[in-house]
Image (cartoon, rainbow, N blue to C red):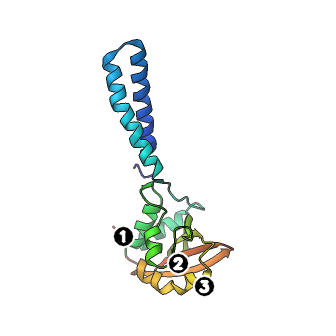
Amino acid sequence: MFRKFSLASLLLTLGGILTSVGFIAYVTGKAALNIGGWFYGVPLILGGLALKSSELKPVPYSQPTSETVIALRDKQETPTQKQLREDVTRYRFGQEAHLDESLKRLGLSPTDPERPVLSGLRETSTDDAYTLILEFESPFITLEKWQEKQEKIEKFFGPEIRAQITQPQEDCIELALISTSEAKVG
C-alpha cells in the first residue's frame, strides 16, 4: 500500500505541521501546544531529512503493461522476477542505486562511477513467455562485457530464467529476464 509513497516526505510533512503548531503556540503563549509541537515536530523533521538524504526513488515503467501481459505474468512470473519488480518500483533507503549489490556480484560494477544505472523497466511477452525488461544506462560497461556475463546472469537470477541482452541505442543496455516457468507464484 505504501510502496509508492515516500516515508521521508511523510515525516517531513508531519514534522513541519507539528513544528508550525509549536511555533504558533509559542508566539500566542500556549505552553502545552508549544512543547508538543517542538518536541515532536523537530525530531520528525530531522528524521525526514535523514531519510530524504538516503532515499532512492522507484524506477518508472517506460511503457504501460497490457492486460495480456499481466495475465501472462500471473501465470508465469518467477519468484525472482516478482521480487525484482517489486523492489525496484518502491522507495528504498540506504542504497546507492537499484540493484547495486547484484551488479557488483555479477562483475558489472567495477566502481561506483562506472556502475550501470537502472533507468526504467517494462513488462512484455517473448515467444508467449512473460518477460521483465530492465533498462540500464551503461556508458562504461560495453555490450560485449554484458554478453560475457549472460550465463552468470541467468544463474544469478534463475532458476527458470533465460536472459537476453540487447543494446537499443548507444550507452543503453536492455536486460530481458524471460520466464521459462509455467508455475504460478503465490
The three-letter code of the residue at mark 3 reads: Glu
* Element on which disc 2 rests: loop
Residue shown at 43%/15% (left/top)?
A: 27
Instruction: Please tell me whether residue 157 is drawn above or below residue 66 in the rendered image.
Output: below
Which of the two labelled residues, at mark 2 and mark 1, occupies the earlier sequence position?
2
Mark before the other along the chain sequence, 3 or 1: 3
Query: Which of disc 3 and disc 2 is earlier in sequence?
Result: 2
Residue displayed at 36% across by 26% down: 37
Please report the residue visible at 55 percent of the width from the left and 58 percent of the height from the top. Answer: 60
Alpha carbons under labels 2 and 1: distance apart: 17 Å
Q: In the image, which disc is placed on residue 128?
A: 2
Label drawn at residue 144: 3
Mark 3 or 1: the one toward you: 3
Residue under circle 1?
185
Q: Residue furthest right?
A: 170
* Quarter of the figure with the C terminus: bottom left
Q: Residue furthest top?
A: 29
For mark 2, does the 10 Å Cα neighbourhood hold few (<14), some (14 to 19), or many (20 or more) residues? Answer: few
Rendered location of residue 115, percent (x, y):
54, 70
For the residue pair 29 and 118, the one nearer the viewer reads as: 29
